[in-house]
Image (tube, rainbow, N blue to C red):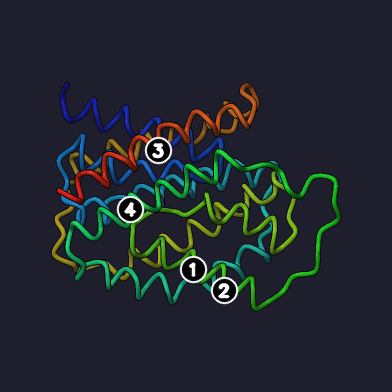
């Protein structure tokens, strides 16, 4: 199968997942770039930030038109993640590739676990008062993960926005895309000028397919139950995590 076809197929799957779930899809971008398209881990994390930024911004627009984005809340949450995202992105370029791969495998495994166990904890309860310290801590942690591993971190942002800031699940999904977009842009800015090569012949079609997939992700979520979609995606993530961990240990 040609590199172009692989890039288009992988991008479409990631865009669909990100648009439908508000997170998780970007976790597949790095392993797809490494194992399907031959990127090094360092180059894959940088390329992933480009893909995640463009795709998240597209998905954000589709959710915003439905009124599912809490702009002020998301901006405050994202602001706490910008400095850690910048610092972590700089650190990632100095970390040995096996360590970076193992860290990514652990993150993919955590994402899968969260998807297997996720429910709508906000349904049937009133929003709780925001605790600024907890919100800032969660935002900073998410920014660190985005900067270091090149993932959006929506699988962590959505439950944090629900449990800490008291958003309903639909609003949390839409708002998480704002947080992901801001953090990804910050991390990408920190990596500007690094020595990781940018293979635009692969990144451009990958990103284009992901953006188009994000437009359809919201419609997909309306046709398939959320829990079923999450379980299927979590199964794929577990397999990816096992593959990457095995690779890191050899």
What percent of the width, then of the height, locates residue 82?
Answer: 46, 72
Name the residue tied to disc 3.
238
Mark sitting on residue 141: 1
Taking depth in this image into account, of 247 and 168 the one nearest to the observer is 247
Name the residue tied to disc 2.
137
At 62% across and 31% down in the image, what residue appears? 227
User: From mark 2 to mark 1, how far is it between C-alphas?
Assistant: 6 Å
What percent of the width, then of the height, locates residue 232?
Answer: 49, 28
Q: Residue 148 vs residue 66: left or right? A: left
Assign a secondary structure to mark 2: helix
Q: Is residue 165 above or below residue 87?
A: above
Instruction: Tell me which label, 1 or 4, sits earlier in the chain.
Output: 4
Marks 1 & 4, CB-CB < 8 Å contact: no
At 35% across and 37% down in the image, what residue appears? 208
At 30% across and 46% down in the image, what residue appears? 30
Taking depth in this image into account, of 121 and 127 the one nearest to the observer is 121
Query: Badge 1 local density, few (<14 within 10 Å), some, or many (20+)?
Result: some
Instruction: Tell me which label, 3 or 4, sits earlier in the chain.
Output: 4
Name the residue tied to disc 4.
104
Q: Nearer the viewer, mark 3 or mark 4?
A: 3
User: From mark 2 to mark 3, how far is it between C-alphas?
Assistant: 27 Å
Instruction: Tell me which label, 2 or 3, sits earlier in the chain.
Output: 2
Q: Is residue 170 above or below residue 160?
A: above
User: From mark 4 to mark 2, how far is it between C-alphas?
Assistant: 21 Å
Marks 2 & 1, CB-CB < 8 Å contact: yes
Q: Residue 156 vs residue 169: left or right? A: left
């Amino acid at each position: 199968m040609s590199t172009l076809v692989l890039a288009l197929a992988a991008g479409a799957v990631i865009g669909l997942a990100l648009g439908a779930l508000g997170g998780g899809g970007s976790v597949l971008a790095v392993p797809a770039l490494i194992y399907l398209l031959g990127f090094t881990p360092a180059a894959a994390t940088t390329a992933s930030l480009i893909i995640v930024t463009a795709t998240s911004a597209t998905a954000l627009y589709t959710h915003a038109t439905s009124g599912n984005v809490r702009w002020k809340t998301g901006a405050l949450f994202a602001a706490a993640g910008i400095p850690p995202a910048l610092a972590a992105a700089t650190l990632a370029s100095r970390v040995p590739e096996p360590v970076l791969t193992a860290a990514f495998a652990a993150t993919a495994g955590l994402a899968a676990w969260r998807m297997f166990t996720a429910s709508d904890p906000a349904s049937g309860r009133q929003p709780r008062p925001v605790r600024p310290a907890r919100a800032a801590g969660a935002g900073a942690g998410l920014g660190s993960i985005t900067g270091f591993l090149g993932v959006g971190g929506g699988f962590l942002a959505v439950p944090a926005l629900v449990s800490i800031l008291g958003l309903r699940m639909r609003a949390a999904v839409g708002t998480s895309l704002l947080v992901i977009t801001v953090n990804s842009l910050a991390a990408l800015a920190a990596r500007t000028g690094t020595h990781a090569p940018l293979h635009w012949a692969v990144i451009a079609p990958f990103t284009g397919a992901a953006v188009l997939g994000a437009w359809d992700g919201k419609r997909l979520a309306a046709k398939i139950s959320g829990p079923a979609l999450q379980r299927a995606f979590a199964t794929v993530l577990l397999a990816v995590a096992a593959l990457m961990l095995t690779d890191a240990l050899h």
